[in-house]
Image (cartoon, rainbow, N blue to C red):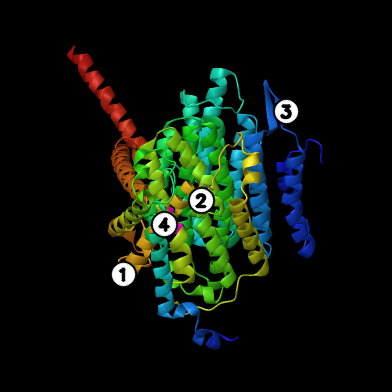
């Protein structure tokens, strides 16, 4: 297969609707896992682990916090790619 | 098989024969070395071998016990994967350096005393730098020099600690000495440098992404895990390590999220994974040490797999910058698939290797009631999903199509990645053989309803957060750039301070020299005036005038004589 054919070929993921389907599948799985918390007895070390969906919302919040604070962090630490090379002799 | 021959020597001595072979025999020979070494290790019963007497000390160059055995096995596996991955490389230097480096790391692992440890410790530094320099660019050269200075520096600090320790205790045995004296403090710092403790970590993110395609794969396996082994051997149960480890899991995440060079993202991720192991060593219980060793074992394989996948992309596309990649699953489907296995392993998805090892550490931390540390480790687990679980495969192989089309990775690379992926899945599905070789008896079942469901909740809700943030355009875009880290202190500030000191010293030096020159010139001028060709004291006098002055003196004498 040459490059031109390859570039015009449509893949399953090129269809936006399929990506939406995957994302909804993920949301569905999350909903299922939340419900699953009611269906078994958790064996835990700390009392707060028994809060409904603790791992779910802790992961969600941690993730959002990481991404948003990293965005702010980028404003502080980002420089041009040749920052260190610029002043080498 | 070979008596009590040190398995590490199989690689080191074998490496010296590599330049004498060519083509297929060389490939087969290099692949055979780790296999023979591993078989030799397996056939050796636990015990101390290879005693050498040097002055009043007895060196134990080969100590096989449950801890060194476990690290030895995974180091041989990593060496095999690295050799297979680099089989297409036509650069003898890299093959020799990689094998000596792997052998040195194994030699250090099997060292029963601190002097042997020091020798191999330095050999890992010196042999591994060639994997960076082999890139043969100015940037790699400079990075390699910085790497070498820091690595050899770690060895020098280790040596100082060893000498003091031997002087204080009279013992050079490499055992659990704990952090209880200045000498052990020095040894601790030496280990900490190689383990990339916070503020001592930047050599890792600086050097690994600058090494060659196959060099980074080899580098990722040995140096830092040797340090983990050394800490587990010498400082298990040192509480400070729990907090150092927790810090290491958390802070690299923020750099990894915004880093553009994918191999540098993996280097930050490596740092974060080391944090879990260091925290486990700090807890120091049997469960925690088992967790650390198991996690090091699994980590070496999935991290090598991730570096292999990114190396394959760099090899085929010519860049590893996220801002220039995307849509590569169309050209490199196998690489993409293997990379996803590695990403899911490091994220600790059930049925993959990270799941069965990281949970041991988290459970050990919880069992000792370090709830704050436990929450940090859980937070870091969500972070791992971001930078290694999602960012690496998503922005390389999916996201927006960069339009780049290339060939799939070479066959030997695919085989190496395939084998690593197989091990990731194998260890995840059937962890019993791994648990069987851990230092202590394992009484732990990873696949309980609680563990599987809570872990899936953590991961899938984090993934949901990504989906929402990315689709709403909140997720930070991949853009070219460089992020300042602690190395700014020595690469920018230190450089400028050195320049300022140079200006100040050369200014003061110039002033002193000018003053001295002025004084000398004045002295010379004075001498010249008095003693020069026209100076009064140096003038030549005619004989006649002397006779005249003698006559005058005689005349005056006569006058005074008559006046008396």
Letter of the chain that mark 4 sits on in the rendering: A
Q: Residues within 10 Å of mark 4 (few under 14, many from 20)?
A: many
Helix, strand, or loop for circle 1?
loop
As drawn, B350 above or below B479: above
Q: Nearer the viewer, mark 1 or mark 4?
A: 4
User: Which label was assigned to residue A33?
Assistant: 4
Where the N terminus of chain B falls, by quadrant? top right
**Is residue B386 located in the magenta-colored stretch of the structure?**
yes
Secondary structure of residue under mark 3:
strand
Give the number of the disc on residue B473: 1
The verdict on a common chain for dots 1 and 3 is yes
Q: CA distance from mark 2 to mark 4?
A: 50 Å
Look at mark 3 in the image and give the residue it sits on: B52
Q: Residue at x 77, y 59 (%)?
A: B28
| Residue B87 locus on image (x, y percent) | 69, 62
**Dot 2 crowding, Cα within 10 Å, few <14, some 14–19, many 20+:** some
| Crowding at mark 1 (Cα within 10 Å: few <14, some 14-19, many 20+) | few
């Amino acid at each position: 297969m040459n490059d031109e054919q390859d570039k015009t070929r449509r893949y399953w993921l090129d269809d936006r609707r399929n990506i939406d389907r995957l994302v909804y599948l993920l949301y569905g799985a999350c909903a299922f896992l939340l419900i699953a918390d009611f269906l078994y007895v958790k064996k835990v070390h700390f009392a707060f682990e028994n809060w409904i969906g603790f791992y779910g919302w802790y992961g969600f919040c941690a993730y959002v916090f990481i991404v948003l604070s990293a965005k702010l962090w980028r404003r502080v630490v980002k420089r041009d790619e040749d920052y260190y090379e610029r002043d080498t002799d | 098989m070979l008596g009590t021959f040190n398995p590490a020597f199989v690689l080191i001595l074998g490496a010296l024969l590599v330049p004498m072979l060519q083509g297929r025999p060389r490939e087969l020979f290099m692949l055979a070395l780790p296999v023979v070494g591993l078989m030799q290790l397996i056939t050796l019963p636990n015990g101390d071998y290879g005693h050498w007497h040097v002055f009043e000390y007895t060196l134990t160059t080969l100590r096989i016990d449950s801890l060194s055995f476990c690290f030895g096995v995974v180091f041989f596996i990593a060496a095999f994967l690295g050799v297979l991955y680099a089989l297409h490389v036509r650069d003898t230097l890299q093959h020799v350096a990689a094998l000596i480096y792997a052998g040195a790391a194994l030699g250090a692992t099997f060292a029963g005393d601190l002097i042997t440890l020091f020798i191999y410790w330095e050999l890992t530094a010196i042999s591994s730098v060639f994997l960076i320099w082999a890139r043969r660019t100015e940037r790699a050269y400079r990075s390699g020099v910085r790497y070498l200075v820091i690595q050899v520096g770690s060895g020098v600090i280790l040596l100082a600690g060893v000498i003091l320790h031997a002087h204080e205790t009279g013992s050079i045995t490499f055992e659990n000495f704990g952090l209880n004296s200045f000498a052990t403090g020095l040894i601790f710092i030496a280990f900490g440098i190689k383990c990339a403790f916070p503020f001592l970590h930047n050599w890792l993110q600086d050097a690994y992404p600058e090494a060659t395609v196959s060099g980074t794969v080899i580098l990722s396996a040995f140096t830092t895990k040797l340090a983990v082994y050394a800490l587990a051997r010498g400082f298990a149960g040192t509480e400070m390590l729990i907090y150092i480890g927790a810090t290491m899991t958390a802070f690299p995440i923020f750099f990894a999220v915004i880093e553009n060079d994918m191999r540098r993202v993996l280097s930050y991720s490596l740092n974060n994974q080391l944090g879990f192991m260091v925290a486990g060593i700090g807890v120091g219980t049997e469960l925690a040490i088992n967790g650390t060793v198991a996690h090091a074992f699994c980590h070496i394989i999935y991290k090598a797999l991730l570096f292999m996948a990114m190396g394959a992309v760099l090899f085929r596309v010519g860049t590893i910058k996220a801002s220039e990649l995307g849509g590569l699953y169309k050209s490199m489907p196998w690489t993409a698939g293997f990379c996803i296995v590695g990403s899911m392993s490091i994220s600790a998805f059930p049925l993959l290797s990270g799941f069965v090892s990281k949970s041991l550490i988290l459970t050990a931390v919880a069992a000792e009631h370090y709830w704050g540390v436990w929450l940090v480790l859980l937070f870091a687990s969500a972070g791992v999903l971001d930078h290694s679980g999602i960012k690496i495969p998503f922005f390389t192989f999916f996201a927006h199509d960069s339009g780049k089309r290339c060939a799939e990775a070479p066959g030997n690379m695919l085989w190496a990645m395939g084998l690593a992926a197989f091990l990731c899945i194998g260890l995840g599905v059937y962890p019993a053989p791994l648990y069987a070789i851990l230092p202590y008896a394992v009484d732990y079942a990873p696949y309980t309803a609680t563990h599987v469901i809570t872990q899936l909740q953590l991961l899938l809700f984090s993934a949901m957060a990504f989906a929402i943030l990315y689709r709403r355009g909140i997720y930070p875009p991949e853009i070219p750039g460089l992020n300042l880290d602690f190395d700014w202190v020595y690469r920018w500030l230190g450089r400028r301070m050195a320049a300022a000191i140079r200006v100040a010293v050369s200014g003061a030096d110039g002033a002193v020299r000018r003053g001295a020159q002025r004084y000398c010139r004045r002295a010379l001028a004075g001498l010249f005036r008095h003693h020069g060709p026209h100076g009064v004291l140096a003038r030549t006098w005619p004989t006649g005038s002397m006779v005249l002055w003698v006559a005058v003196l005689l005349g005056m004498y006569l006058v005074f004589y008559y006046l008396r």
